[in-house]
């Protein structure tokens, strides 16, 4: 009697078999944006170290900073059309938790997947939005180039979707954007911890199955360019609000930050919120989120480290 045939196991890198609905981008005679897509300081968390050229971002990993997620949002967003950008993890350091998320976020969102203003893919193959994870794509790691394609072209069958490609091959089927993001200007963004990431907003380094324009090639009618006024003398302002306890101090601060988004709040509640969005809790983080001494961090320890 012949031995039973071996069952074929599904592998993580099995390519989707669904017909590709994306087609080559058509020639567009509309004027292109002239501004270089980059990361502006107000649109990054304080633990992001950007390179002077090349759009390489590194997260600070000293002490408690190694436990906090770094976030950055690009200066150019799109409101229509179909565009992509590439990301590559070039280094991961430290013995604490490591993570990278790539996707798109609306203005005001620096922590991908943690609110209703963003959507992303992580290294484990999860799509993350409003803190909910859905397994939908292949995992990716260092030295792999992933491309995120945002399709908000009303004429496309994949309208209002986001897709992930790994080394030029589709890693997941088009995923629907949540209603909270539809109709908004969406900016390329990355969230990462104990990692260095290179972002490419120009023509793709790795060709996709179809021709797709990079964010840098966006037309004026499709794009929104974010800018911040810089002081003429090069000096910036620091404010120290003084108020009586329990007299609406944070209500005033919330209103001030809303009207002046180029300011950054520094307070216990700010760092507590940052720590919570980084996966920590008052009882300590998950076992894999540990310091170099392997001792668990709590929010109170994070606050004392600054």
Image (cartoon, grey):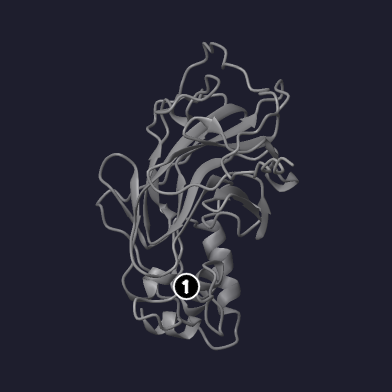
Based on the displayed image, in which of its 4 quarters is residue 174 positioned? top right
Percent across and percent down for residue 44 are 42, 54
Image height of 108 relative to 17, above or below: below
From this view, report whether residue 134 is shown above or below residue 245: above
Q: Position of residue 296 (x, y in %)?
A: 45, 82
Residue at 45% over, 67% down:
97
Q: Residue furthest front?
A: 1
Q: Quadrant of the N terminus?
A: top right
Q: Residue at x 53, y 41 (%)?
A: 187
Q: Can residue 73 be seen?
A: yes
Q: Is residue 275 above or below residue 104?
A: below
Residue drawn at point x = 64 percent, y = 45 percent: 9
Assess disc 1: are there few (<14), some (14-19) or many (≥20) residues with their C-alpha within 10 Å of its C-alpha.
many
Above or below, comparing residue 199 to residue 111 in the picture: above
Q: Which residue is mark 1?
A: 289
Q: Nearer the viewer, residue 196 or 219?
A: 196
Q: Quadrant of residue 202?
A: top left
- Can you give x and y, in whole percent of width and height, for residue 86 in the image? 45, 36
Residue 136 is situated, as x and y percent measured from the top left of the image, at: 66, 46
Kind of element beneath mark 1: loop
Q: Relative to the observer, which residue lies in front, 281 or 20?
A: 20
* Quarter occupied by the C terminus: bottom left
Can the viewer see residue 79?
no
């Amino acid at each position: 009697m012949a031995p039973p045939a071996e069952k074929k196991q599904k592998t993580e890198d099995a390519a989707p078999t669904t017909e590709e609905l994306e087609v080559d981008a058509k020639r567009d005679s509309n004027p292109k944006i002239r501004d270089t897509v980059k990361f502006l300081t107000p649109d990054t968390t304080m633990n992001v170290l950007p390179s002077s050229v090349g759009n390489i971002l590194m997260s600070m990993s000293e002490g408690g900073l190694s436990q906090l997620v770094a976030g950055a949002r690009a200066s150019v967003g799109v409101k229509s059309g179909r565009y992509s950008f590439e990301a590559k993890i070039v280094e991961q350091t430290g013995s604490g938790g490591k993570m990278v998320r790539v996707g798109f976020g609306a203005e005001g969102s620096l922590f991908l997947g943690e609110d209703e203003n963003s959507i992303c893919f992580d290294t484990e193959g999860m799509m993350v939005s409003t803190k909910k994870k859905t397994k939908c794509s292949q995992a990716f790691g260092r030295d792999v180039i992933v491309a995120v394609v945002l399709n908000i072209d009303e004429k496309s069958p994949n309208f209002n979707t986001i897709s992930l490609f790994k080394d030029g091959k589709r890693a997941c089927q088009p995923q629907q954007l949540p209603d909270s993001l539809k109709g908004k200007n969406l900016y390329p963004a990355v969230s990462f911890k104990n990692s260095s990431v290179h972002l490419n907003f120009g023509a793709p380094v790795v060709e996709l199955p179809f021709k797709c324009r990079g964010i840098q090639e966006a037309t004026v009618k499709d794009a929104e360019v974010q800018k911040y006024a810089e002081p003429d003398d090069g000096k910036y302002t620091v404010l120290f609000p003084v108020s009586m306890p329990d007299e609406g101090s944070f209500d005033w601060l919330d209103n001030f930050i809303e009207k002046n988004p180029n300011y950054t709040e520094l307070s216990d509640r700010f760092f507590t919120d940052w720590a919570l969005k980084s996966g920590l809790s008052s009882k300590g983080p998950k076992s894999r989120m540990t310091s170099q001494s392997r001792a668990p961090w709590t929010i109170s320890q994070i606050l004392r480290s600054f």
